[in-house]
Image: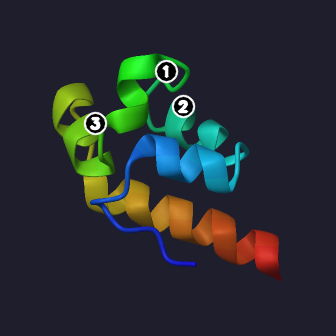
Amino acid sequence: MTVTKDMTIGELLMMDRGCAVVLMEAGMHCVGCPASAGETLEEAAAVHGFDVDALVDKLNAYFQNKNE
């Protein structure tokens, strides 16, 4: 599985709720908000002021480490 910046937060959380920790560490503390579920990672990054590419890298590393 590869995370991309056009994936929604809802999609990620349905695949693995553990990725919420990665999102919160990046500064997105509202992962439980119903509105955030429909946001893409790119949209969330723009709203919260963080680097979407760095977040995608962290999420992909999370899933890679989990599968090893």
Residue furthest to the left in view is 46
Q: Which residue is drawn at 54% across and 70% down?
A: 60
In this view, the residue in front, 19 or 37, is 37
Q: Which residue is drawn at 79% across and 69% down?
A: 66
Label 3 belongs to which residue? 44
Q: What element carries label 2?
A: helix
Q: What element carries label 1?
A: loop
Q: Which residue is drawn at 50% across and 77% down?
A: 2
In the rendered structure, the answer to whether residue 1 lies left or right of residue 8 reads: right
Residue 20 position (above or below residue 41)? above
Tell me, yes or no, whether the two marked residues, 2 and 1, touch with CB atoms within 8 Å. yes
Q: Residue at x 79, y 78 (%)?
A: 67
Q: How far apart are marks 1 and 3 (CA)?
A: 11 Å
Residue 13 x/y as whole percent: 60, 44
Mark 2 residue type: Met
Residue 24 image label: 2
**For the residue carrying disc 3, how many other residues have a C-alpha within 10 Å: few (<14), some (14-19), or many (20+)?**
many
**For the residue carrying disc 1, how many other residues have a C-alpha within 10 Å: few (<14), some (14-19), or many (20+)?**
few
Residue 1 x/y as whole percent: 58, 78
Label 1 belongs to which residue? 29
Residue furthest to the bottom in view is 68
Label 2 vs 1, first from the N-terminus: 2
